[in-house]
Amino acid sequence: LATSGSALAAEDQPLWEVGAGVAAFSFPSYRGSDQTNNFLMPVPHFTYHGDFLKADRQGIRGSFFDSDRLDLTVSLALSPPASSEDIKARAGMSDLDATFEIGPQMDVTFWRSENRARFVKLLLPLRAAFTVQGTPRDIGWVFHPKLNMDITDLPGLPGWNLGTLAGPLFGDRRQHAYYYSVAPQYATADRPAYEAKAGYAGMQYLVALSKRYPKYWVGGFVRYDNLTGATFADSPLVRQKDYFAGGVAITWILGESSTRVKVND
């Protein structure tokens, strides 16, 4: 999830902003689970528009170089833990730890409006994944190419920003094994042993809306996942192959820099 923030095209903005708020999320316990976890949690609000490090509605990233059509940045992702005691499909198995992903991302801009308020990009992140509870463990690689379209200041809805993402996921054997393999010692009558393979991991589609007010920010998103055709689709731990997830958040701006910088997009 990207940090909350605003992105007004080609406009002077504070170098940094800080704040805090609350968010409500609804997600499956893991991709393919038929059980849902609902979260209500505090969230930070942080934007930073430095020459290298940037944090805004597009996420936290370090820009190694940029051109009119090509950007090389750092991609980050997090996932919450899931206790197998609370997941029927994983009863008796090891818990799923929280994970952290990091790696390079190449962004290719196909089209951008003259005022830079709207664009279409291809995002190409490749991330290494690690568990973050107890002793960190390497659990493989994730490749998630996405087509991204952003529209700032929607027609008829001034101040509202629309963001869309769509693309397939791919993972190596270790990544898929962490979530979908069933070792022989965990096999049961209705959960046979299973060894996950590398390859295609389904499709994701996301739509998000947000608006920045003078002293606070509101936003929400809906994501649709479809695992049809995934290399692990026949795992006994995959209990549903398509589902929706979503969330809403509100954050209040508590402070900002007196230094102003020009933000292009």
Image (cartoon, grey):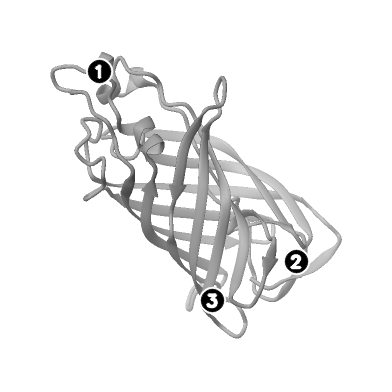
Q: Is residue 238 left or right of residue 72?
A: left
**Depth check, front residue: 221 or 79:** 79
Amino acid type at circle 1 is: Pro
Give x and y (percent) for residue 156. Answer: 47, 77
Q: How far apart are the two marked residues, 2 and 1, measured between alpha carbons? A: 57 Å
Secondary-structure class at tag 3: strand
Figure quadrant of the C terminus: bottom right
Q: How far apart are the two marked residues, 2 and 3, measured between alpha carbons? A: 18 Å
Nearer the camera: disc 2 or disc 3: 3
In the picture, the disc for residue 184 is 1
Amino acid type at circle 2 is: Gln
Q: Identify whether 236 is placed above or below 184.
A: below
- Which residue carries the number 3 mark? 118
Secondary-structure class at tag 1: helix
In the picture, the disc for residue 13 is 2
The image quadrant that residue 239 belongs to is top left
Label 3: few (<14), some (14–19) or many (≥20) C-alpha neighbours in 10 Å: many
